[in-house]
Amino acid sequence: MEVPILKQGQYLIASIQSALTDADLSQLREALIERVGRYRARGVIVDVTALDVMDSFAVRTLRDIAHMARLRGSETVIVGIQPEVAFAMVQLGLTLKGIATALDLEEGLAFLNAKARERT
Amino acid sequence: MSDELRLEIAADVDVVRAREQGRELAAAHGFSLGDQTVIATAISEIARNILMYAKRGEVRLYSLNDGSRDGLRVIAEDRGPGIRDLPRAMQDGFSTSGGLGLGLPGAKRLMDDFTVDSAPGRGTIVTMIKWKRSHG
């Protein structure tokens, strides 16, 4: 299941629609990193609202996306982690330390806009 | 003991299917949304371990009752290389696969009951149980 990636202004929005296999997650990582360059994106939003499980592989992949995007000059924010998912992640020992998160898409855009203002 | 579901794990789609089946069974037995998520996450971790270390194996799901409460038992079994150093494998951050090393200790924290039976060359059996909280 390929994740659609939308371009909105200087940002890329990857909106996950359903459960993803490990291969899907890796594919999302490659696609996003390539597009950050192609569209000269300054920000990436990964919307995980539809994910009902975030296990260690998913979290590692999101972390990789954020770190790789930053190396390419783009900020990443993860939005839409569901409350039960957050609970299970913390129990599992996953924290997304150092990665920006926001409650939803709107907050994620606000975060990236604030970052963009800092830069100018 | 009523339901039993046997799920083959041989590809990454099987990991997704196993955790979805686990969630469905937990929902059918009245587990809260939070506990369904916890169970699905634990299944995801141990099913992926099968794939990473043994290439193939199976996950079995059972509903159970100990006389006073309902529970869900998950058994993950493979005939892979087994775990050489079990105490270390149960430590956070220890991994021989380049993963995060949270699979076994993380799944243990998520579940109420957790045992691993493994020896080099003999494969691995992980058994874990989540009990349903009584009307909380």
Image: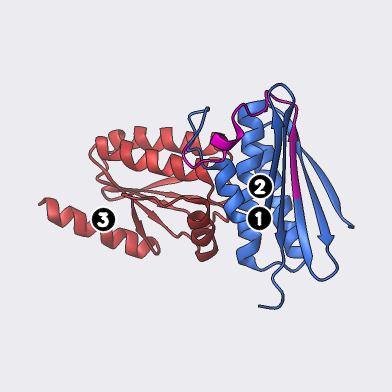
Chain colours: A red, B blue
- In the rendered structure, which amino acid carries the disc numbered 1? Ile
Assign the N terminus of chain B to one quadrant of the image: bottom right
Between marks 1 and 3 in the image, the one whose residue lies nearer the viewer: 1
The residues bearing labels 2 and 3 have C-alpha atoms spaced at a distance of: 35 Å
Residue A14: % across, % down: 42, 48
* In the rendered image, residues at marks 1 and 2 fall on the same chain: yes
Residue A72 colored in magenta in the image: no
- In the rendered structure, which amino acid carries the disc numbered 2? Ile
Query: From where the camera sits, is residue A86 visible?
Result: yes
Q: Chain of mark 2?
A: B
- In the rendered structure, which amino acid carries the disc numbered 3? Leu
Near-viewer residue (A80 or B124): B124
Assign the C terminus of chain B to one quadrant of the image: bottom right
The residue drawn where x is 26% and y is 40% is: A70
Q: Which residue is mark 2?
A: B43
Q: Which residue is mark 3?
A: A112
The residue drawn where x is 74% and y is 25% is: B122
Residue ranking furthest to the left: A120
Quarter of the rendering containing residue B86 = top right
Quarter of the rendering containing residue B39 = bottom right
The residues bearing labels 1 and 3 have C-alpha atoms spaced at a distance of: 34 Å
Is the residue B128 above or below the residue B85 in the image? below
Q: Chain of mark 1?
A: B
Residue B90 colored in magenta in the image: yes
Tell me where the magenta segment starts and ends, as one range.
Answer: B74-93
Q: What's the mark number on residue A9?
A: none
Residue B102: % across, % down: 52, 42
Q: Chain of mark 3?
A: A
Q: Which residue is mark 1?
A: B39
The reply to whether the C-beta atoms of the residues labelled 1 and 2 are less than 8 Å apart is yes
